[in-house]
Image (cartoon, rainbow, N blue to C red):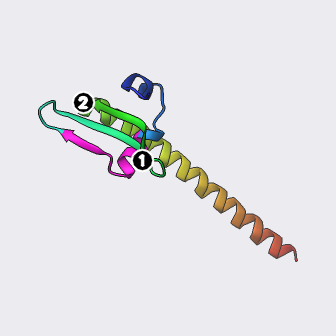
Amino acid sequence: EVTPEVLKKGIHRNLRNAIAHVYFTYLEEKQKMQFWDMLPDKNQYSMKPVELHYKEFSRYVAEINIFVEIYGFIVLLIVAFEDIAKRQKRQRH
């Protein structure tokens, strides 16, 4: 079970999926966001509903964003290095 305490340890895959697949709602009476994640082929929870205040939620989203930016930058570097290697190989031939 994924609880806010587990999310604090850096397990964000399910939260990212909940956002991407619109598995969230705003609980106005509690002033919290509720997130859950589903296994699409089994129609079961992969993360049971977790309620987070905006400050908790925004911190996790900021961490997810940093990870995505770093990952995207690394992929961009890999593509650039592959392109450089291909160009150098063509120049040699």
Q: Position of residue 78 (x, y in %)?
A: 66, 56
Residue 48 at x, y percent in the picture:
37, 34
Q: Residue at x 31, y 34 (%)?
A: 57
* Image quarter of residue 29: top left
Number of other residues with Cα within 10 Å of mark 2, as a class: few under 14, some 14 to 19, many 20 or more: some
Q: In this rendering, which labeled residue sits more in front, label 2 or label 1?
A: 1
Q: Quadrant of residue 44?
A: top left
Secondary structure type for disc 1: loop
Per the image, label 2 sits on a secondary structure element best described as loop
Front residue of this view, candidates 71 and 56: 56
Q: What label does residue 55 carry, if any?
A: none
Residue type at the position of mark 1: Asn
Q: Amino acid at mark 2?
A: His
Image position of 56 (left or right of 26): right
11 relative to 85, above or below: above
**Pointer 1 local density, CA inside 10 Å: few below 14, some 14–19, many at least 20:** few
Residue at the spot 24% in from the left edge and 34% down from the top edge: 54
Q: Which residue is rendered at x = 45% and y = 36% of the image? A: 12
Residue 47, picture quadrant: top left
Residue wearing tag 1: 43
Residue beneath the point at 37% across and 52% down: 21
Q: Is residue 9 above or below residue 16?
A: above
Q: Residue furthest left?
A: 29
Q: Magenta segment range?
A: 15-26
| Mark 2 lies on residue | 53
Q: Which label's residue is closer to the chain start, 2 or 1?
A: 1
Image marks 2 and 1: residues in contact by CB distance under 8 Å: no
